[in-house]
Image (cartoon, rainbow, N blue to C red):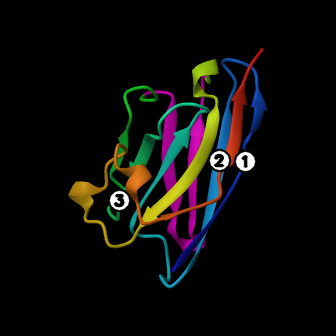
C-alpha cells in the first residue's frame, strides 16, 4: 500500500509558475518506480499530464509539453511537477499517482489516471 500526499497548489496569474510536490510512503523503500501526475477540471474527464518511470524517462501530454517538468528525488521519496507559463486552461485539481508494478513501456502520461495509487489532490487555479 502506497500513501501519496500532494502539496504546492494555489492560485497564480497566467504565465506564472507553481511547483507541486508529492511525498510517497509505504511498502516500497524508495520511489524508483512508475509515477505521474494527472488532473481533473470541473465537468471534464481526467487528463494524464506527465509520467516518470524507474529509469527516469519522462513523458508528457502535448498540452503541457515544454511548460511542465516532472522529476523525482528517490532518496526522499518525493515527486515534483514544475509548472511554468501557466494558462487558465491548466486550472484543475492535480493528483499524484504511482504504480510500482507498471513496466516502463506502459508508464505513460496518458495512463496516469489509471495508476494503482493516487493522492487526495491539490488545487491549481490560474486566473487574472
Residue drawn 78% across the image and 31% down it: 11
Residue 8's disc number: 1
Q: Are marks 2 and 1 in contact (CB under 8 Å)?
A: yes
Q: Earlier in the sequence, mark 2 or mark 1?
A: 1
Residue drawn 49% across the image and 76% down it: 30
Secondary structure under tag 3 reads loop
How packed is label 2: few (under 14 Cα within 10 Å), some, or many (20 or more)? many
Residue on which disc 3 sits: 53
Q: Main secondary structure of the magenta part?
A: strand
User: Is residue 55 or residue 41 the one in the foreground?
Assistant: 41
> How far apart are the alpha carbons under marks 2 and 1?
4 Å
Residue 20's disc number: 2
Q: Is residue 25 above or below residue 23?
A: below
Q: Is residue 18 above or below residue 90?
A: below
Residue 34, x across and y down, in percent: 38, 62
Q: Which region is colored magenta?
A: 66-85
Residue 98's disc number: none
Q: Earlier in the sequence, mark 3 or mark 1?
A: 1
> How far apart are the alpha carbons under marks 2 and 3?
18 Å
> How far apart are the alpha carbons under marks 3 and 1?
22 Å
Q: Is residue 29 above or below residue 46?
A: below
How packed is label 1: few (under 14 Cα within 10 Å), some, or many (20 or more)? some
Which image quarter holds the C terminus? top right
Extreme front residue here? 43
Secondary structure under tag 2 reads strand
Quarter holding residue 123 = top right
Quarter holding residue 93 = top right
Q: Are marks 2 and 3 in contact (CB under 8 Å)?
A: no
Instruction: Examine the structure image and report whether residue 78 is included in the region drawn in magenta.
Output: yes
Residue 97, x across and y down, in percent: 49, 58
Amino acid at each position: 500500500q502506497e500513501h501519496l500526499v500532494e502539496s504546492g497548489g494555489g492560485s497564480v496569474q497566467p504565465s506564472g509558475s507553481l511547483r507541486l510536490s508529492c511525498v510517497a510512503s509505504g511498502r516500497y523503500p524508495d520511489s524508483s518506480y512508475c509515477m505521474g501526475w494527472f488532473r481533473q477540471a470541473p465537468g471534464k474527464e481526467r487528463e494524464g499530464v506527465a509520467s516518470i518511470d524507474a529509469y527516469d524517462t519522462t513523458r508528457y501530454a502535448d498540452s503541457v509539453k515544454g511548460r511542465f517538468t516532472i522529476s523525482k528525488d528517490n532518496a526522499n521519496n518525493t515527486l515534483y511537477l514544475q509548472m511554468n507559463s501557466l494558462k487558465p486552461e491548466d486550472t484543475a485539481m492535480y493528483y499524484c499517482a504511482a504504480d510500482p508494478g507498471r513496466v516502463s513501456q506502459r508508464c505513460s502520461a496518458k495512463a496516469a489516471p489509471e495508476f494503482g495509487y493516487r493522492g487526495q489532490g491539490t488545487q491549481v487555479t490560474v486566473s487574472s
